Amino acid sequence: MILDYRERINLLMKLRDVIKGYEKEIYRALEADLGKSAFEAYESEIGLILMELNYTIKYLSSWMKFKTVPTPLSHMPATSMVYREPYGRVLILSPWNYPFHLTLIPLIHAWAAGNQVTIKPSEIAEHSQKVIYEMLTENFHTSRVRVMTGGPKVTMDLLDKKFDFIFFTGSKRVGRIIMEKAASQMTPVCLQMGGKTPCIVDKTCNLRSAAKRIVRGKFLNCGQSSTAPEFVLIDESVKDAFIQYVRRYIRQFYGKEPLKSPDYGKIINHIHFYRLMDLIEHQEIIIGGEFDTMTLQIAPTVVYENSLCSEMMKTEIFGPILPLITYQTWEEAIDKIDRFHHSPALYLFTKDKEHEEYVKNHCFAGSICINDTMLQAATTYLPFGGVGSSGTGKYHGKAGFDTFSNIKSVMRRSSAGGSSVMYPPFTDKMQLLKKILK
């Protein structure tokens, strides 16, 4: 049964009330799983979810209306329309790094489009998974949403079932498995995955502002963000000044001892903690490097990196480690950036309009932000998603509604009248055909 407008709005409004009612539980879960402060939890999770909900509620009526589009002269008399209808049963597989944000925003879009939803939150963020399960199962009927908990076996069992659409956020390794499973049943997918997100700092930029914004974007959620800068590619002539600014802002944001800062989080678990420690074991550390195995914390760390072929540069870091790579000329910078094709995002700090235009028009990335980081991923007005190996499909705002909708073409032709040019015999009709079809 296709949900009408009022049923969809009621679901979304109820979800908004439920989230507000569970605000304290969400704070506690995020602190336990990721060490997030209440401010960061609201800024990067609850606040963005509510913003998406309010935007969707405001515009859903207009999104649901069919759109009349032009009809070719050869098809007249007729009317052409575009309808959006739900896929039906959709599966949302969400990750651990933003467990509420990356579960509930896809749910908002799925419900806005009228779908029945099954959610599998990540078991790695165990406290968040429990709250998500309780929030949704105690407040919504199973005909609207089901929440499945457990480990990889639960995910694989779900993938063996037939769904009409699958939305996945996570690693490329798991994304490939999702795509293979979906392909076996011809199920359409939207995959949001990670990659190496470059950040270029040229010599014309405001270095102080660049350092401040890069430090904020990189170390938010301890670097456990798919769109966080993975490395900084910086003009050699401004490297030293940039490092001093980075050092200043790390101290300003997190104090002399970042591991004791209430505004600095932790790594999700021991597996990821030791993976990150292995990455920096043989690196030349410029800033940071302190760690605490008990609290699973690694201080904001900046390292020198000379090779694009090192283990640090071949893998997605997904943690609070920022490699610094220098370049001598703009052409050299572009050559290095081109090796990271299909990145989830790309950042450029510059005052040079030619550099800006080149990056916007020639660098292939899921999204681009000039003179800041992460902000392009935190708005309802811009579609968000990767490209190529970093993802397929977009969401946020209307793009999310469209992603969870089957876009159906409808033509209604009059039963009377119409041109006879398309019907045999075709003798002496070629010139008229060429006039019509051009």
Image (tube, helix red, strand yellow):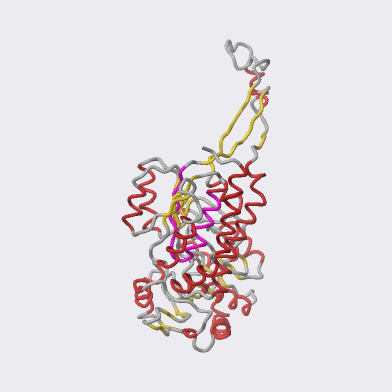
At horizontal 47% and vertical 54% (from top left) the residue drawn is 391
Magenta span includes 87: no
x%, y% of residue 102? 50, 60
x%, y% of residue 42? 57, 69
Q: Nearer the viewer, residue 347 or 330?
A: 347
At horizontal 48% and vertical 85% (from top left) the residue drawn is 260
In the image: residue 352, left or right of residue 227: right
At horizontal 62% and vertical 60% (from top left) the residue drawn is 51
- Up the image or down, 90 lies above or below 334; here it is above
Choose top left, top right, bottom left or bottom right for residue 270: bottom left
Q: Residue furthest bottom?
A: 256
Q: Nearer the viewer, residue 413 or 233?
A: 413
x%, y% of residue 20? 58, 63
- Up the image or down, 81 lies above or below 273; here it is above
Q: Nearer the viewer, residue 411 or 145?
A: 145
Q: Nearer the viewer, residue 390 or 383?
A: 383
- Up the image or down, 152 lies above or below 260; here it is above
Q: Residue furthest left?
A: 153
Q: Which portion, as a residue range, is magenta?
A: 89-110
Placement of the C terminus among the 4 image quadrants: top right
Q: Residue furthest front?
A: 138
In the image: residue 216, left or right of residue 89: right
x%, y% of residue 274? 34, 75
| Badge count | 0
- Up the image or down, 200 lies above or below 393; here it is below
